[in-house]
Amino acid sequence: MAKSVFYHAGCPVCISAEHDIVELIGAEKVEIVHLGEVSSRIGEAEAAGVKSVPALVTSNGNVLHINFGASIADVKG
Amino acid sequence: MAKSVFYHAGCPVCISAEHDIVELIGAEKVEIVHLGEVSSRIGEAEAAGVKSVPALVTSNGNVLHINFGASIADVKG
């Protein structure tokens, strides 16, 4: 199975959700992307349909917005 | 690892998220509870901190609200 991608921005809600997702899915099955540090990938996240972080984009392209840390607009600053 | 519990209420958002979660985590690791059909468990979901469905309560008690289908108040009708 292709990897899922977990987008976050370092907020407390994001970090908590990241730990849960990694434990549930397995670290080898999910790529973690910190949009606050790798802002060049914000466009990729938006194109995938990510409206807020933390969010998980599954290998089949579905977006799961998990709780609510910050909107993508906030991440862009 | 103890099972996680996925609470939903049959809405389209819920069903889509259910498929994704089962595929990601594995059906053997998650109990699916349809609160629309098993309303006796709404109290349990609320006690766990579930504010809206679909939501996943992890084995360590964290609540992941995934996208937004309906509030618990709506599920209660």
Image (cartoon, coloured by chain):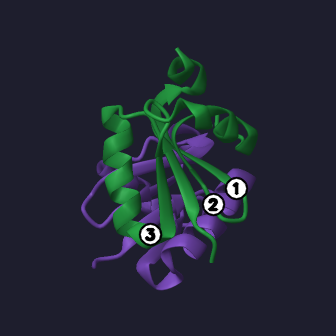
Chain colours: A green, B purple
Q: Residue at x 59, y 33 (%)?
A: A40
| Distance between the alpha carbons at the discs numbered 2 and 1 | 5 Å
Answer above or below: position of A54 versus A56.
Answer: above
Q: Which amino acid does label 1 sit on?
A: Asn
Q: Disc 3 is attached to a residue of which chain?
A: A
Left/right placement of residue A57 relative to residue B46 reads: right
Residue assigned mark 1? A62
Q: Disc 1 is attached to a residue of which chain?
A: A
Closer-to-camera residue (A29/B50): A29
Q: Looking at the rendering, which quadrant does residue B1 occupy?
A: bottom left
Residue assigned mark 3? A25
Q: Earlier in the sequence, mark 1 or mark 3?
A: 3
Q: Which amino acid does label 2 sit on?
A: Thr
Closer-to-camera residue (A14/B73): A14
| Image x and y of residue A65, in percent | 57, 44
| Distance between the alpha carbons at the discs numbered 3 and 2 | 11 Å
Numbered mark located on residue B18 in the image: none
Residue B35 seen in render: no
| Distance between the alpha carbons at the discs numbered 1 and 3 | 15 Å
Answer above or below: position of A43 versus A7.
Answer: above
Q: What element carries label 1?
A: loop
Numbered mark located on residue A58 in the image: 2
Q: Residue at x 45, y 58 (%)?
A: B56
Q: Are marks 1 and 3 on the same chain?
A: yes
Whether tag 2 and tag 1 are in contact, CB under 8 A, the answer is yes
Q: Disc 2 is attached to a residue of which chain?
A: A
Q: Which residue is drawn at 28% across and 77% down?
A: B2
